[in-house]
Image (spheres, rainbow, N blue to C red):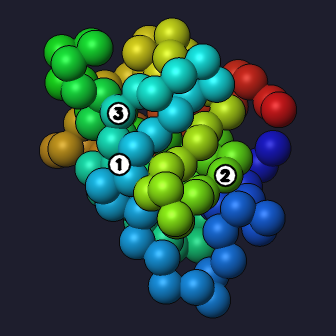
Amino acid sequence: MSSMQLWDYRPDVYDRGQALDITGYHVHATDGKIGSVDEATYEVGESYVVVDTGPWIFGKKVMLPASVITRIDPQEREVYVSRTKEEIKNAPEFDEARFKEPEYRTRVGDYYGRWTH
């Protein structure tokens, strides 16, 4: 998967023509609920979601590349991702001061790029 694809929504999951804001949606890992979407972006090749994991790992926030989203359910306000709770728990913590820097994106991308589904 190229770096550009990693940071883009899968075409079968999110249609750019729809105006869908997933902020506040519940997030489900492959093995259960992990938190909620705190922020989401929709730029081509630079899309991500910030997930607030809540109390199960003490309020940590993580940034997930858009490509890990496998399904969005607007009726139930839920987002499903192709990672386990453990993989998300061990992800680099969201760094509000650095998240737009290329080195930070590369580090996060390298972490999530390890698994191809």
- In the image, residue 18 sits, relative to residue 57, either above or below, namely below
Instruction: Give the residue number, with chain letter if any, for mark 2.
Output: 71
Instruction: Provide the residue designation for mark 1.
Output: 37
The answer to which of 9 and 18 lies nearer the viewer is 18
Residue 16 occupies quadrant: bottom right
Q: Is residue 83 left or right of residue 93?
A: right
N-terminal of the pair, mark 2 or mark 3, is 3
Could you give the CA–CA distance between mark 3 and mark 1, rounded to whole angstroms?
7 Å
Q: In the orientation shown, which residue stands out farthest toward the bottom?
A: 17
Residue 87 at x, y percent in the picture: 54, 16
Tell me the kind of residue under disc 1.
Answer: Val
Q: Quadrant of the C terminus?
A: top right
Determine if residue 101 is in view.
no
Numbered disc 2: secondary structure: strand
Looking at the rendered structure, the kind of residue marked 3 is: Gly
Lower sequence index among marks 2 and 1: 1
Question: Percent position (x, y) of residue 50?
Answer: 35, 46
Residue at point 60% right, 38% down?
81
Residue 100: assigned label: none
Q: Report how far apart the C-alphas of labels 2 and 1 lie in the structure.
A: 14 Å
What mark, if any, has residue 35 been given in the picture?
3
